Image (tube, rainbow, N blue to C red):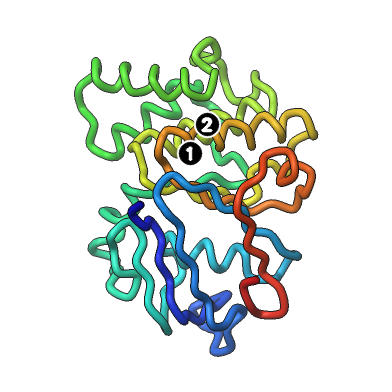
Amino acid sequence: MNNVVHIEKALIYASSKLNSPILSDVSLTIGEGELLYLVGRVGSGKSSLMKTIYGELPLRVGKGVVCGFDLRKITSKNLYKFRRHIGVVFQEYNLMAGMSVYENLEFVLRATEWKNKRAINRRIEEVLNTVSMADKAHRLPSEVSGGERQRVCIARAILSSPRLIIADEPTGNLDPAAASEIISLFHTIVDQGCSVILSTHNSENVRLFPSRVVRCADGFLI
C-alpha cells in the first residue's frame, strides 16, 4: 500500500507567527484508501494539523510528505499543483449562494482550466451521482437541506479525483441522521481508493462507522 501521508517527528503550530507548537513529536502515516478519524477537544490541534497537511500552515520542524510532495518545499509557486491532489471539506459550506449546484461545480472546474463543455458536463454528472445529488443539480444552495449542501461540498472536493480528502468537522452543523449519511458517504469514497482524514466530535458515528482513530490530547497525537 502506498502512503498518501507520511509525517515524522514534526512540530505543529497553530499559526505561522507562533513559536510554541500546539502539537509535538507528531508522526503519522496514512495509506492509500484509508479513512482516519481525528478526534480531540476544541483547541487541541486538530485543525492546525490538517492545515499543515494541506499546506495552509508551513511545516517548520520535522519531515512530511503528502501525495508525493515534500511539505518543507511547498511554496506559493507550487502550492496550486499540490492542492490539485487534495480535496477539502469544511463545516461551513462556502457555496456561492447565487449559483446553482451545477454552477458551483462548473465554476471550480473552469477555474482549474477545464474548457471542454462536454467534459465538464460529464465530470459534474459523475460526482453528483457519487453523492446522490444528480436530481438537485439546478437547485440553489438555499433550496436544498444542510445535509445536501454538504454533499455538494463533497462533490466539489472530489472533482479533481484527489488522492486525499481532508474533512474538518463536516457534520458539525447537521442533525444525527444527516451526519450519519455524510460519514457513510466518506466511507464509500474511501472504498473507491481515495484516502480521507475526518475530524469529528461525534463519537456515535465513529462507533457506527469504525476506522482508525487518532486523538489530539495534551499536545501530542495518541
At x 53%, y 47%, the residue is 35
At x 68%, y 59%, the residue is 39
- In the shown orientation, is residue 107 left or right of residue 170? left
| SS at mark 1 in the image | helix
| Kind of residue at disc 2 | Thr
Seen in the picture, residue 127 relative to 200 is either above or below; the reply is above
At x 43%, y 76%, the residue is 8
Disc 2: CA contacts within 10 A as few (<14), some (14-19) or many (>=20):
some
Which is more toward the observer, 56 or 1? 1
The residue singled out by tag 2 in the image is 188
Seen in the picture, residue 114 relative to 199 is either above or below; the reply is above
Extreme residue in the left direction = 116
- State the image coordinates of residue 36 (x, y, percent, origin top left): 56, 53
- In the shown orientation, is residue 150 left or right of residue 125? right
Q: Quadrant of residue 55?
A: bottom left
Q: Quadrant of residue 81?
A: bottom left
| Kind of residue at disc 1 | Val
- State the image coordinates of residue 176 (x, y, percent, origin top left): 79, 34
Report if the CB atoms under discs 2 and 1 are less than 8 Å apart.
yes
In 3D space, how far apart are the residues under numbered discs 2 and 1 (Cα atoms)? 5 Å
Q: Quadrant of residue 107?
A: top left
| SS at mark 2 in the image | helix
Disc 1: CA contacts within 10 A as few (<14), some (14-19) or many (>=20):
some
* Residue 190 tag number: 1
- State the image coordinates of residue 95 (x, y, percent, origin top left): 54, 35
- State the image coordinates of residue 221 (x, y, percent, origin top left): 62, 72
Extreme residue in the top direction = 135
